[in-house]
Each structure stands twice: as C-alpha cells, then as structure tokens.
Amino acid sequence: MSEAAPWLRPLINLWNGLSYRARYALLGALFGTLFPLTSSLIWVITNRLQLNLDNFLRAQVNNPLQWMIDSAPFFLGLFASFAGQREDGLQAVKRELENRLAERSRMVVELDSLRNRLEMQVSKQVAQLKLTTQVASDALQAKDLQQIMDLVVRLISERLGFYHAGIFLLDPTHEYAVLRASSSKGGQVMLSRNHRLRVGREGIVGNVAAHGEPRVAHDVGKDAAFFNNPDLPATRSEVALPLRIGDSVFGVLDIQSVKMGDFSAEDVAVLQTMADQVSMVIENARLASERREALQQLREFQARQSQDAWRTALADRPHGVVYDGLSIHSIQAWQPPTNAPRQFPTKDPYVLHQKIVYQDIPIGTLALSRPAERGAWSEAEKRFVQSVASQIALAVENARLLDENQRRAQSEQLLGEISARAHASLDLDAVMKISVQEIGKALGAMRVEMRLDSDSPSNNTSSATLAAQSHNGHKPSQSQTAEES
C-alpha cells in the first residue's frame, strides 16, 4: 500500500485522533446531507430548472417538506454518535482485555523466568548440599589432612563450577593465613611460593580470619578489602567463609568466580554449612593425626622399654635352651635381641628358623632341624611353627612381666623393712648404723658407707661416717667405722 499524499497526512492524523463517537457522528452527518441534496436535485429536475445554486436554494425555500429533510444530517449524526459511543465502549473493553492479556502474558513470562531462576537456585543449593554430604563422606576415606583438603577444594570447583577454591590455615601465631590447598592452576603457583595473607590486614581472607564472619565481594573491583592477585586474573566475585570449631577460627575457605554477583545470600548460607562440615572433618583429621603420632610414640617407648627389659632379663641367665631328643640343656651362644636381630641361614631345607616376635619386638628365634630322610619342612609345618612361635612370644613375655613384678615386690618389701628398722630408733648414730647394715645385707655389698656432710664440701665442719660390710662375715675395720672429715 502506497503512502498517503503529504497534504492528506494532517487529515489522517486528525481522523485517527478522533474517538469512534466523533467519527460516527461526522460520518452520519455527512451521510445525512445526501438527503436534502438529493431531494433538492429531484425538485429542480422535476420542475425542469437549470442545475445551479439558486435553483437549489429555491428548492429549500419553496418546499416545506424539504425543511424536514434538511434535519436528516443532524439526526443521522446524532444516532451515529450513539453507535460510536457504544463502539468506544467496546474498544475500551477490548483495550482493557488486551491490556489484561498483555499483563497476564507479562506475568506468565515473569513467572516462567522466576520459576527458572528458582529451579536453578534450588538445583544449585541441592548440588551444594549434596556436595556437603559427599565432602563429609569422602573425607572419611582420606588418609591424612592434606589429602582431605585437596579433595575438598577439587570437589567444590568440579561440582559447583567455581573458578578457584582454596583452604587457608592459620599459622601457630595466628599472624598469617597460609594457603594449604588449591584447585586452580594459579592456586598451585601460589602454593609453590608459600602464599600467605596477614590476618586482619590483607585481603578478604585476612578479614574473615580476623573477624570470624563470612564476607562476600559481589564485584571485587569495588571491594576495598580485595587482594588483587595476579595469579587469579579472572576473578570477578569472591566469598570467604570461616573454618571454625566453636568460637575458634583456625582457617578460611576461599571461593572465587568469574561472574560478578555469583554468590547470593542463600548460596553463602549453604556454603557456610559446607564450611562447617569441612571444619569438623579437618579437626577430626588433625585429632586423628595427633592420636596416631601419640600412639606411635607410645609404641616406640614401649618397644624401647621392652627391649631394655629383655636385655636386663637375659643378662644374668642362659640365653637359650636346646632339646636333642633325649634331654634339655641351656646354651649361651645367642645374643640379646636388638632392633636388628641376628640372621640365621635358611638355605638348608631340613633346618627351620622362626623368629619369636612380641608386638614387633624380636625377642628370640626358634630353630628346628630333622634328618634328611624325613624330607624338607612342608608349608603346613612352617605355618604351625609360626603359630607356636606367636604363642611362645606371648608366654615368655608374660613370664618376664611376672618375674619383673616379683622382683619389684621384693625390692619394695626390702625397702619397707629397711625403713621400718631405721624408723624404730630415735638415735642418729643408731639410724645410720642400721641403715648401712640393712642395705649391705639386702644388696650383698662388700662395703656400704654413709656420710652426713654440710652443704658446702669446703666447710671444715664435722661429719659422721659409718661403714658396714655385707653379710659375708667380714667385719668393718676401725677406720671404716667412724672418722672425722
């Protein structure tokens, strides 16, 4: 359709600006003018007059009926205006319906958008909650603290799609937060140079480590606390979450994204829940590590104590016994067990050597030999000897402990007897004499000497000196009995 002529455009604009009532009234009036014009034309033609304006006017003046016809434009315009008014009402209703439909469509679009956002948010939160559970579950399978931290940051980046995740732990002085685990390549570079942030002074991590509250930077370029790290140039938003046990903060979980405003309040709440789970896992791993170290130290101490006890126990008795098929007798060839036990030859198939070990402490060897005609030792026989050696280790250890307890009981009994005899006298010389005599008898000493001196050996103060020989029948000499110092 061609465009209207320029001179018609104002008329078209004027027409479009009119209401339907005005349009209908104007059209009705124009249509009504056809009636008086037509009747005047018929009158002029019927009277065989010329078609001119004067004759048309004469038709209007001389014909009374024409006066009624002349009112047609008015009445037709009036009636048309009523129809136009109704059309205006219909158009208003139509516009209202269209507006409502458009509003409804807009609301549908908004609801769809809101539903999509909610679904994405719920999916994200569900993923975060699942990750929280998985972190707690998988961390139980980890062997040490470093493995747990590496697992946590890797799962956060992979499952939640974040650019960088890192775990900072406070140093013993709580002066620095030291990066201990990272999921990004830039974070690995930071780990290699021992990256750390001063608590309360550097970065969002330092701020959270100092105050113990989560902090979000929706636009890191506008956050004064943000640490501009050249190793992580794509960071646009960041959240730092405290790792704490109770009110004590021991580290920070740092998560960074390439999107601005990527951390909503709901995200922070869920991520803080995950950080609390991570805190418990890390604390449990640390306590387990401390327990393992303490247990290892205890085992090493027990091993040293047991080895010393076995050296003492074997120092004054035969180191072994042998059965030759007829009798049992003692042997002196073996040495006390050490951390590097004596190695015996094992190439002879008719000789079987089995170590006697108690709690990883070698305490002896069981050697068996038999004639060649009986053949080499079978695997079943070797397993049997191994089981016997385990039972022997337990039996000899129990015997050693029993002997040690008996000796300790005897020592305590002798100590009690000596103390009782010494306390029975109130005389200083008598107490000294009784003490040296009882000690000599108890320990079989050839000579026991006691001196009571002043604090300074250089002082020329007097001291009493008593000596007594052991109960082998010798008597102390006069010079051993008393002397002046």
Image: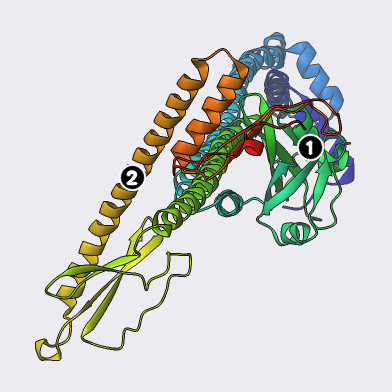
Residue at screen point 60% across, 39% down = 477
In the rendered image, which residue does mark 2 sit on? Answer: 403
Give coordinates of residue 195: x percent, y percent: 80, 52
Residue at screen point 31% across, 66% down = 320
Residue 30, image quadrant:
top right
Q: Which mark is residue 173?
A: 1
**Above or below: residue 95 compared with residue 447:** above
Label 1 or label 2, whichever comes before in sequence order: 1
Residue 97, image quadrant:
top right
For the C terminus, the quadrant is: top right
Q: Amino acid at mark 1?
A: Thr
Instruction: Give the tally of numbered discs.
Output: 2
Give coordinates of residue 445: x percent, y percent: 51, 44
Does the CB distance between marks 1 and 2 fall below 8 Å? no
Residue at screen point 36% across, 59% down = 317
Q: Can residue 241 be seen here?
A: no
Q: Is residue 67 left or right of residue 300?
A: right
Of residues 298 and 176, which is closer to you in this image? 298
Q: Amino acid at mark 2?
A: Asp
Give coordinates of residue 240: x percent, y percent: 71, 38
Q: Is residue 344 left or right of residue 383?
A: right
Q: Which mark is residue 386?
A: none
**In front of the other: label 1 or label 2?**
2
Of residues 359 and 292, which is closer to you in this image? 359
